Image (tube, rainbow, N blue to C red):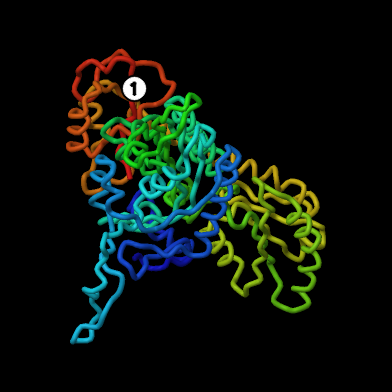
Amino acid sequence: MAKTKTHADALTAREVDYSAWYNELVEVAALAEHSAVRGCMVIRPYGYAIWENIQRALDERIKATGHSNAYFPLFIPKSFLQKEANHVDGFAMECAVVTHSRLKKAPDGTLVPDPDSALAEELIVRPTSETIIGESFARWVKSYRDLPLLINQWANVVRWEMRTRLFLRTMEFLWQEGHTVHADYEDAERETRQMLEVYRELAEEVLAIPVIVGKKTEREKFAGAMHTYCIEAMMQDRKALQAGTSHNLGQNFARGFGITYQSKDQVETLAWTTSWGVSTRLIGGVIMTHSDDQGLVLPPAIAPVHVVVIPIRCAKPEERAAVEAYLAPLLEKLKARAFAGRAIAVQVDWSDARPGAKHFEWEKRGVPVRVEVGPRDMEQGKLVYALRTGGEKTTTTRDAFADEVLDVLARVQRGLLERARAFRDEHTRDLDDRAAFDAFFTPKNPEKPELHGGFVRGGWCGDAGCEAAVKEALKVTIRCIPLDAPAFAGACVACGQPSAAGLPRVVWAKSY
């Protein structure tokens, strides 16, 4: 873990060491830390407040589409995982397995599994819940009248990752996972695409992260799915981040778990299922899309604190009393207003730190708006505010600021999305030549590989072997086949063979 940074000892610059910058920022912004359990993280209160705001925004959208929340067990019988062959193959290497139910003391005093407590059937610690939920759905669904069945759960999952990074890839993480049952393919496909659109809206309108909406190749799709759709975002190091996925599972899991229903014609019919999810990796996505060398930058829609007020001089009791009296009507008005469905969160920094230290503290934590109030401001009924995203300080009256704040926050939110979209577009290329493709993804200085590459829109022959060869050579994958893009009649950028009929240019990139 990098050492804690101070105002005099700023974050490592992104262009010097992007990975170090990210790790240091997570620490100094008090978002999360490594746990005593290798590969796991402790989400600190400020980081968890960001997750709660993401969760709240998404949960409202999920419920608005007719879904209900439920909860299913953390432990899954091993036999359940084996009921869908592709699924077990996809997750077998990532599973944590419970074999015993208690411990005992060995002669040397150490704790060991009690042989007498060996489980009759080993349990898998939830890597994802299609199987355990499928077992319940088989009991819940009897008739066409029970469909569609629309369920979501907020939970933790465990995947035994060897290389971890806070928020982006940890052994345990938080997420939501939707699971639904439908009468036919068309309804399942409509559900899958609908939830993909919910994720796009969350990413762009709440997180201010522009995304490409597309379909995964057969090689990259979810284990056991018929189709996998995704949203892909570009981070500031120009790598792709898969920010959400939605899967049409076809009848694979329904067949494995006997999810059937009586049709209107009284025919027992095999159902169709879907699943979809996003996780706490979205916080990593927000960090890497918006933040800078000074610290965290947060979209107001998810910021735990919208406005921080820094009194310039309030050391003496009478000075503080005067500032409190001056701020009281402002705070009352601000807290009565709402942005993105939440009351505006205001914090006054009464600490005894110097103003410069306070500025740095709130800057690194990404608070969108910083307000300063000094004796002269109070005499004139004014205040000064500055935006975390930069620009000149603005002087306005106390009362006017309360009326302007919603427009100010909306401008910051909109500006972050526009800036991130411009960055993505700047580092996206249409390429048709393999030599140019290789050069685009090869660092000019191998000893300093940060900040190169981006997205390539290029043809693809449709062959999984060609796709695999590119990954082996360059660590570049097809992130998605963009939806609603025109067909491309040129050649595969990787092998030069004709692009597969009907396919658009696909998005190639290195990724997290």
Q: Residue furthest top?
A: 489
Query: What's the residue at 61%, 50% (across, down)?
Result: 387
What percent of the width, then of the height, locates residue 122?
27, 60
Viewer-closest of 279 and 135: 135
Viewer-closest of 289 and 396: 289
Viewer-closest of 498 and 386: 498
Task: Name the image quarter holding residue 442.
Answer: top left
Can you say whether 137 is above or below 382 in the image? Answer: above
Query: Please, what secondary structure does the residue beneath circle 1 have?
Result: loop
Query: What's the residue at 61%, 57% (across, down)?
Result: 305
Can see residue 487? yes
Neighbour tally class for label 1: few under 14, some 14-19, many 20 plus, Cα within 10 Å: many
Task: Name the image quarter holding residue 121.
Answer: bottom left
Name the residue beneath numbered marker 1: 505
Q: Quadrant of the N terminus?
A: bottom left
What percent of the width, then of the height, locates residue 288?
43, 48
